[in-house]
């Protein structure tokens, strides 16, 4: 009887973790890399031609640089990023106990600056924040994404999924309408991807610079003529968290190059 | 923005007068109307067309002007899951951007121009 109950419980656990209708099963998840042409792939693959690597190098210098009134560098606490930061970005956004909610890698860097370096926060989308973020995330290149596993994150993942499926804006479209139901089709000639977050911050040829996921999400929201959330808004963090959990198992590519 | 639905269409012009097909063609090709982002059509001069929605080349065979008008005004009437926006709707929407709040995607006259153009697309 006990045994049967255990089977029933296991079956329930499997069913409750099953994909919701329309969600892309693990084996069918594809990085944006697979949607782009050979020239852009080659640019990403070769570190000497990948423009994102310039930001990674700047981030490495910032990692070593003392900052704030505590006169400490990231390296003074974290040591060699190649080992201490390996896999970290693949788990972000992560739950922060003091905030009681998930924080992004950018927010973690600024929490560290405020708390440990006693330095001013770096503005969102500033060169230095992107560079540090790219340097840290680069240490996870080829590490499979596992973000969202922490049970404390569950309500925030659910909130992010709701945003993903919520139609919004004057055009009344949800993220899922394009990135789940219509990937591989062409919007004004350009292929629609699955929106798997494998390479942020990434170098976008259209931007001619490195940019954050939040920049990308905000431009999609503007595209459907919705009011974009502000940088760092809890709604954007929840959406990022859901998207990362949705990319589970795909290897990190930071800094990716995209058209 | 009142309009009267009869059967599966809106038989009367939203402005009370017929649209201009030449202006309608230019509107379909203007990215700001969003048509060409998802649809393709007989527009050899336009490279970047979409394939999320049916080709428009025979729209005038498939639908009457009355049917085209209602499909532009509110396609969700026929399929609540459709990705085609309701071009003449200004309420029951979520988080509409400040610059667009309270306005339909297209003005009545623009819809009439596009209807007039689409009705000419016959194989």
Image (cartoon, coloured by chain):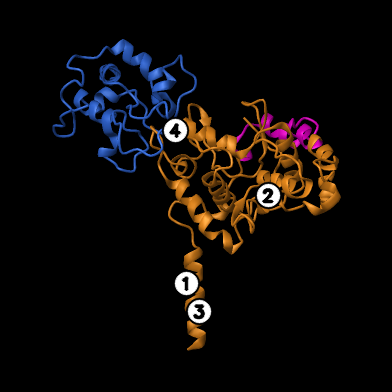
Q: What chain letter is assigned to the residue under label 2?
A: A
- Residue B91 appears in which quarter of the rendering? top left
For mark 3, what is the residue?
Answer: A7
Q: How crowded is mark 4: few (under 14 residues within 10 Å), some or many (20 or more)?
A: many
Q: Distance between the residues labelled 3 and 2?
A: 33 Å
Q: Which chain is orange?
A: A
* Chain-order first, disc 3 or disc 1: 3
Q: What element carries label 3?
A: helix
* Chain-order first, disc 1 or disc 4: 1
Q: What chain letter is assigned to the residue under label 1?
A: A
For mark 2, what is the residue?
Answer: A251
For mark 1, what is the residue?
Answer: A12
Q: How far apart are marks 4 and 3 (CA)?
A: 46 Å
Q: Residues within 10 Å of mark 2 (few under 14, many from 20)?
A: some
The residue positioned 28% from the left and 28% from the top of the image is: B88
For mark 4, what is the residue?
Answer: A224
The residue positioned 52% from the left and 36% from the top of the image is: A192
Q: Nearer the viewer, residue A244 or A32?
A: A244
* Chain-order first, disc 3 or disc 2: 3
Q: How far apart are marks 2 and 1 (CA)?
A: 29 Å
Whole-percent x, y for residue A150 in the image: 61, 61
Span of residues in magenta:
A33-57
Q: Nearer the viewer, mark 2 or mark 4?
A: 4
The quadrant in which the N terminus of chain B is found is: top left
């Amino acid at each position: 009887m006990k045994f049967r109950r255990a089977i029933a419980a296991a079956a329930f656990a499997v069913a409750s973790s099953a994909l919701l209708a329309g969600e892309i099963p693990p084996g069918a998840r594809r990085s944006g890399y697979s949607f782009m042409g050979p020239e852009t792939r080659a640019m990403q693959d070769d570190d000497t031609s990948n423009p994102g690597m310039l930001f990674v190098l700047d981030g490495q210098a910032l990692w070593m640089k003392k900052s704030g009134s505590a006169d400490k560098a990231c390296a003074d606490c974290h040591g060699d990023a190649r080992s201490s930061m390996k896999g970290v970005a693949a788990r972000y956004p992560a739950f922060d106990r003091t905030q009681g909610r998930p924080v992004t890698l950018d927010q973690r860097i600024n929490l560290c600056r405020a708390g440990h370096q006693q330095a001013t926060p770096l503005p969102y989308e500033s060169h230095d924040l992107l560079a540090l973020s790219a340097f840290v995330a680069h240490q996870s290149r080829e590490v499979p994404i596992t973000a969202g596993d922490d049970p404390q994150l569950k309500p925030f993942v659910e909130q992010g999924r709701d945003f993903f499926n919520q139609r919004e804006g004057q055009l009344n479209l949800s993220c899922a309408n394009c990135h789940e139901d219509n990937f591989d089709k062409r919007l004004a000639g350009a292929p629609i991807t699955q929106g798997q977050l494998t390479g942020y911050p990434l170098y976008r040829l259209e931007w001619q610079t490195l940019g954050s996921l939040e920049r990308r999400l905000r431009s999609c929201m503007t595209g459907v003529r919705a009011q974009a959330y502000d940088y760092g808004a809890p709604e954007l963090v929840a959406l990022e968290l859901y998207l990362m959990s949705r990319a589970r198992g795909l290897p990190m590519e930071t800094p990716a190059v995209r058209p | 923005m009142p309009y009267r639905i009869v059967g599966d269409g809106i038989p009367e012009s939203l402005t009370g007068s017929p649209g201009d097909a030449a202006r309608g063609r230019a509107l379909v090709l203007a990215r700001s109307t969003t048509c060409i982002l998802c649809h393709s059509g007989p527009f050899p001069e336009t490279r970047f067309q979409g394939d999320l929605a049916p080709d428009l080349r025979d729209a005038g065979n498939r639908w009457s002007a009355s049917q085209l008008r209602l499909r532009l005004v509110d396609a969700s009437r026929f399929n609540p899951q459709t990705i085609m926006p309701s071009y003449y709707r200004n309420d029951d929407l979520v988080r509409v951007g400040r610059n667009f709040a309270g306005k339909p995607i297209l003005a009545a006259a623009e819809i009439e121009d596009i209807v007039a153009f689409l009705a000419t697309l016959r194989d």
